[in-house]
Image (cartoon, rainbow, N blue to C red):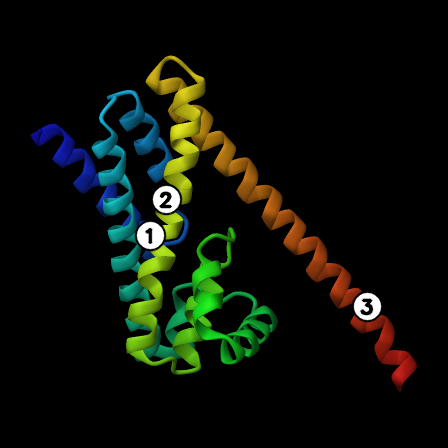
C-alpha cells in the first residue's frame, strides 16, 4: 500500500512540476501510471491515478496563474511562457467571449493550456471563475490521458509495453496537433499578408 501511495505522490509531483515548467510531458506520466495500474487489476488504482493526476495539474495551474497575475507579461517572457503574442491576442478575444468553455477545452488541446492560462491571467479573469472552471478541466484532462493509458495496457500483455505504447501515442498525437496548428497559423498569416497590399 505504501508503495502505491509513494508512486501516486510522485505522479502528483511530476504533474504539478510539469504544469509550471511545460517541458515535462505530464499527459504521458498520467497515461503511463494508468497503464501500470491496469495490470494491477484494481479499478480503484486507476481512479486514484486520475485523482492524483488531476490534483497535480490543478495545483500546478494555480501556481502558474498566480505567478502570471502577480508578475504579468514581464515575468511570463522571462520564464519563456510567453512566445507567440499574436496567438495570445486571439486567445484573449475568445476568452472574453466565453470564459468557462475555453478553459475546459484548453487542457485537451496540445499546447493550448499555456496560452489560455496566460490570457486568463493577463485579462484579469476573476480568481473564483478560474478556480471553479479549472476543476472539471483538470479532471477531464486526467481522465482522457488515463483512458489512453488503460487502452495501451489492455492491448499489450506486459505492463512496460503498455506504458511505452501510451507514451509514444501521446507524443505522436501532440506532435501531429502542433504541426497542424502551425500549418493553419502559417496559412492564416500568408492570407493576411496577401490581403494587405490589395487593401492598400
Estimate the spatial distance between the alpha carbons at disc 3 and disc 2, rounded to whole Å.
Answer: 38 Å
Estimate the spatial distance between the alpha carbons at disc 1 and disc 3, rounded to whole Å.
Answer: 38 Å
Looking at this view, is 40 or 121 the one in front?
A: 40
Name the residue located 29 percent from the left edge and 77 percent from the top edge.
127
Q: Residue furthest left?
A: 2
Q: Residues within 10 Å of mark 1 (few under 14, many from 20)?
A: many
Give the left or right position of residue 183, taking residue 9 as reference: right
Label 1: element kind = helix
Q: Earlier in the sequence, mark 3 or mark 2?
A: 2
Residue named by callout 1: 139
Give the left or right position of residue 180, taking residue 106 as reference: right
Residue 132 drawn above or below residue 186: below
Label 3: element kind = helix
Residue 77, can we see it?
no
Name the residue located 71 percent from the left edge and 57 percent from the top edge.
184
Looking at this view, is 68 or 124 the one in front?
A: 124
Residue 7 position, x and y percent, is 19, 34
As drawn, the label of residue 1 is none
Q: Residue furthest front?
A: 43
Label 2: element kind = helix
**Disc 2 + disc 1, Cβ < 8 Å:** yes
Residue named by callout 3: 191
Q: Residues within 10 Å of mark 3 (few under 14, many from 20)?
A: few
Residue 80 drawn above or below residue 97: above
Give the left or right position of residue 94, taking residue 78 as reference: right
Residue 138 position, x and y percent, is 34, 55
Residue 199 drawn above or below residue 180: below
Residue 194 drawn above or below residue 198: above
Q: Residue furthest bottom?
A: 200
Residue named by callout 2: 143
Amino acid at each position: 500500500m505504501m508503495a502505491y501511495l509513494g508512486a501516486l505522490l510522485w505522479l502528483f509531483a511530476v504533474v504539478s512540476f510539469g504544469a509550471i515548467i511545460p517541458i515535462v510531458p505530464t499527459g504521458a506520466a498520467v497515461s503511463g501510471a494508468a497503464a501500470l495500474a491496469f495490470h494491477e487489476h484494481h479499478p480503484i488504482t486507476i481512479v486514484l491515478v486520475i485523482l492524483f493526476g488531476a490534483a497535480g495539474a490543478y495545483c500546478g495551474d494555480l501556481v502558474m496563474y498566480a505567478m502570471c497575475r502577480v508578475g504579468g507579461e514581464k515575468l511570463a517572457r522571462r520564464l519563456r511562457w510567453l512566445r507567440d503574442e499574436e496567438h495570445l491576442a486571439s486567445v484573449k478575444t475568445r476568452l472574453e467571449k466565453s470564459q468557462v468553455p475555453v478553459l475546459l477545452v484548453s487542457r485537451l488541446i496540445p499546447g493550448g493550456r499555456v496560452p489560455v492560462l496566460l490570457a486568463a491571467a493577463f485579462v484579469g479573469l476573476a480568481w473564483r471563475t478560474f478556480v471553479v472552471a479549472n476543476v472539471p478541466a483538470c479532471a477531464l484532462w486526467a481522465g482522457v490521458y488515463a483512458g489512453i493509458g488503460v487502452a495501451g495496457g489492455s492491448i499489450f500483455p506486459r505492463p512496460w509495453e503498455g506504458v511505452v505504447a501510451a507514451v509514444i501515442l501521446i507524443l505522436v498525437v501532440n506532435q501531429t496537433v502542433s504541426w497542424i496548428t502551425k500549418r493553419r497559423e502559417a496559412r492564416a498569416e500568408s492570407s493576411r499578408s496577401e490581403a494587405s497590399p490589395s487593401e492598400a
